Amino acid sequence: MNIQWYPGHMTRTRRQMAVSLKQVDAVCEVVDARIPQVSRNPDMDEIAGNKPRILILNRTDLADPEATKQWAAFYRSKGYAVLTTDAKSGAGVAKFSAAVRTLLADKIEKWKEKGQTGRSVKVMVVGIPNVGKSTFINKVLGRKSAKAADKPGVTRGQQWFRVEGGLELLDTPGILWPKLDDERTGILLAVTGAVKDNILDVETLACKLMEILYHHAPELLTERYKFELPHEDEEIDFLGYELLMRAGRKRGFLISGGEIDTERMARILLDEYRGGKLGRITLETPDEYAEEQANG
Ligand code: GDP
């Protein structure tokens, strides 16, 4: 599926979400910890309005732990509650209920004053496709994937579920559009698998990924592919392509005439990065993001 976000679709999603938002006390935004800022919906702040927000840095099993700490601190400094999770294994998910209740402590206190002691906190989960929303919800609800009937949500097909610890969760996540209007975000979303590869051809994408990995984790790149990094005085026109060729040569991916099968190497690089085979690598840092904001 290649995601195309037509204006009509966005308008409909916004409208549905506005209805759902009225029913919740907090919004839980799931992002990919390898690209926390890029995997956020650009209009999220506007959509969520003043609702308290908890940000889930998911896929921490694939992200650099130090970078995840930096991102968590960054978002906390902006007033979000932050939880780091690996929804696939379930690591971190058990802290969700308590984190939401802490986030809403003042509100819960007011409910208590009004005698509403048993009132549960309602949360909806949102995020761009493929960041792990469903996996996260299933883990919070303690189920594999099948859903059981409970009371219906406001949008057709949505269900509210009670979670232990005074929490109710809307089981169908709000699916938001990613930002695809500049090359960098498109590439980062494609290399992490948030959007399909076909926004760029596979070799171009892999070349871009090589350059990003060269920048963020050169030692992990050489460890995996056993090639030499270019020396400082080497003149290279296309760094990503050069690295792809070096990796392909080491792996012995040759086609007739002794040429290197860079397309095969491209697919392998993308698969291996996505599967965490190169190690835990985060592709953007809070500093880079701040710099980009400063440069407009
Ligand atoms: P959604 O589109 O946001 O609901 O995403 P899904 O929950 O369907 O997850 C997309 C893919 O990412 C699935 O293959 C999940 O198994 C995988 N996934 C979700 N969370 C994690 C995580 O924390 N770590 C890893 N490694 N994979 C995850």
Image: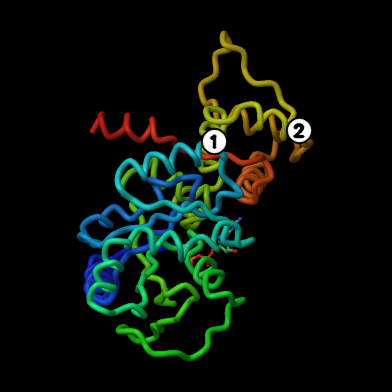
Q: Residue at x 27, y 77 (%)?
A: 23
Helix, strand or loop under label 2? helix
Rendered position, 199 above or below 19: above
Q: Earlier in the sequence, mark 1 or mark 2?
A: 1
For the rendered model, the colour scheme is rainbow
Q: Measuring from the top left, give residue 97's x and y in whole percent.
A: 46, 66
Q: Measuring from the top left, give residue 218's x and y in whole percent.
A: 61, 27
Which residue position is annotated with label 2?
258
Which residue position is annotated with label 1?
66
Q: Measuring from the top left, give residue 81's x and y in whole percent.
A: 37, 53
Q: Residue at x 42, y 51 (%)?
A: 82
Q: Amino acid at mark 1?
A: Glu
Q: Amino acid at mark 2?
A: Gly
Mark 2 surroundings within 10 Å by alpha-carbon count, few (fewer than 14), some (14 through 19), many (20 or more): few
Ligand 1 sits in quadrant: bottom right
Q: Residue at x 24, y 72 (%)?
A: 113
